[in-house]
Amino acid sequence: MSFYFRDGYLYCDQLKVKDIQSQIPESPFYLYSKQQITNNYNAYSEAIEGLDAIIGYAVKANNNLAILKHLQKLGSSAVLVSGNELRIVLKANFKPERTIL
């Protein structure tokens, strides 16, 4: 369970969102569940197991470097539409051969 309420507080990956918010200097902010990203990736990976297929994350959907680094570690490829996106995925440690232009 990634986001949930307990005792009147919103939690993300077992961390109280209010505590996270108190450490962020500005609001609003984006909060992503690393566990949910992992779960989603694994579900896709299991669904295509045994097929001649790859998972390619569309960088234009979200170019957050931390998310891209995590997806790269999980084994994802990156789908790009610009030179800037190539620059970003290289910073996220994607190998050029794991990119789709």
Image (cartoon, rainbow, N blue to C red):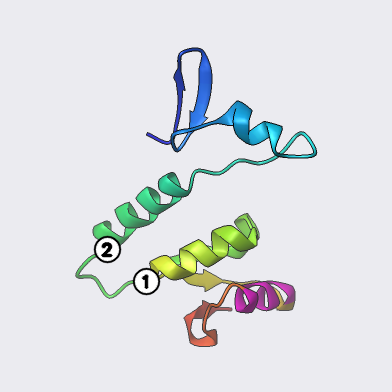
Task: Work out which residue is located at the far bottom of the displayed protein and give it.
Answer: 97
Q: Which residue is mark 1?
A: 54
Q: Nearer the viewer, residue 22 or 41?
A: 22
The three-letter code of the residue at mark 2 reads Ile
Q: Is residue 14 above or below residue 98?
A: above
Sequence-wise, which precedes: disc 2 or disc 1?
A: 2
Which segment is the magenta one? 84-91
Of residues 1 and 60, which is closer to you in this image? 1
Residue at 55% across / 44% down in the picture? 32
Give the residue drawn at x 49%, y 43%: 33
User: What number is the disc on residue 48?
Assistant: 2
> Percent x, y for residue 17?
58, 30
Query: Is residue 42 covered in magenta?
Result: no
Rendered image quadrant of residue 31: top right
- CB atoms of marks 2 and 1 within 8 Å: yes
Question: Could you tell me which secondary element the residue under label 2 belongs to?
Answer: loop
